Image (cartoon, rainbow, N blue to C red):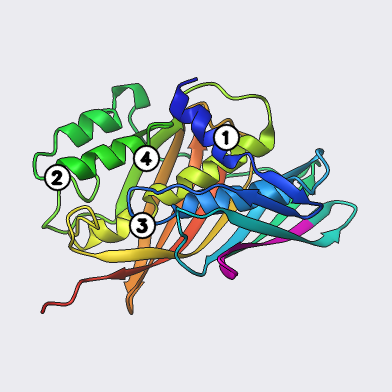
Amino acid sequence: MNQALQDLLDLLDLEQIEENIFRGESRSAVVPRVFGGQVAAQALVAAGRTVPADRYAHSLHAYFLRTGDPGAPIVYTVERIRDGRSFTTRRVLAVQHGRPIFALSASFQAYEEGLDHQTPMPPAPDPETVPTGRERLLGYDHLDQGIVERFLEAREAIDLRYVDDPPYGRFGEPREPHSQVWFRTNGKLVDDPLLHVVLATYVSDMTLLDSILLAHGRGGWAVGDVVGASLDHAMWFHRPFRADEWLLYDQESPSAYGGRGLGQARIYTQDGRLAVSVIQEGVVRVPREH
């Protein structure tokens, strides 16, 4: 396990300060604010620590309310909404400086047998044949070197590989609003189902709005032709998976309108099992000309 992955695991290992209250550290992302995937992942950790070990996360629904301050800790308060025979529901509020910055509802289920079908995995190249994130980024001469270094540092714990050029790699002309990314952690993880779900939640916020930018030939914040932020985020965890094994993140955007854009995606294991469905809406605005 590399040091960056250990640092990420430490970041997600919350301090419990009361029965239903947890505290997490913060750190800057590639932009000068707390990464939304970090807050979502920490909130899911807080919820999961109040749930019996034999119940597994099957869905989460969340709202990003305010920009997080990377220089201050985040306090997570868990509300125990329901403890049923099959399902357990939790609500989590993340607070900084006395104000809520994020709200999450999560549901957990005891394992049971049931009907089984899925959408087939789409075609994708073998992840080992796709350029690494470092190889792609170092090939983009038009990007500021400081931005490249921030990308590489922020994603050092995750081996994340774009199948095609990301928005900031090739922009100026619209492309199909569809993006594929292979990802896994840069190191093996323990056999804790919640940890694997939490890490998938963390990564899911990294690239989901890319397909909106592709549809309009925009490069994103890295080249300064749009500004944006996540508004809400939903995930459904269908089947067991490991975040330290290759996962295909197949993403698309069906709509953008009114300063908002929608991204939707499916995450598949390398052997073709549909593991997760994801939907996110974000603010996507073109900077005004002065």
Task: Tell me the quarter of the image containing the C terminus.
Answer: bottom left
Nearer-N-terminus badge (1/4): 1
Number of the label disc, if any, that sits on residue 154 = 4
Q: Measure the alpha-carbon separation of dots 1 and 4.
A: 15 Å
Nearer-N-terminus badge (2/1): 1
Q: Which residue is mark 3?
A: 209
Q: Which residues are magenta?
A: 89-101
Nearer-N-terminus badge (3/1): 1
State which mark lies toward you, 1 or 4.
Answer: 1
Q: Which residue is mark 2?
A: 143
Secondary structure under tag 3 reads loop
Number of the label disc, if any, that sits on residue 123 = none
Nearer-N-terminus badge (4/2): 2
Is residue 289 toward the left or the right of residue 76 in the image?
left
Quarter assignment of residue 218:
bottom left
Q: Which residue is mark 1?
A: 10
Marks 4 and 3 in Cβ contact (< 8 Å)? no
Q: Is residue 153 magenta?
A: no
Looking at the image, which residue is at 30% across and 41% down?
Answer: 151
Q: Measure the alpha-carbon separation of dots 2 and 3.
A: 20 Å
Q: Measure the alpha-carbon separation of dots 4 and 2.
A: 16 Å
Secondary structure under tag 1 reads helix
Residue 119 in sight in this render: no
- In percent of width and height, residue 171 lies at 14, 53
Secondary structure under tag 2 reads loop
Q: Measure the alpha-carbon separation of dots 4 and 3.
A: 18 Å
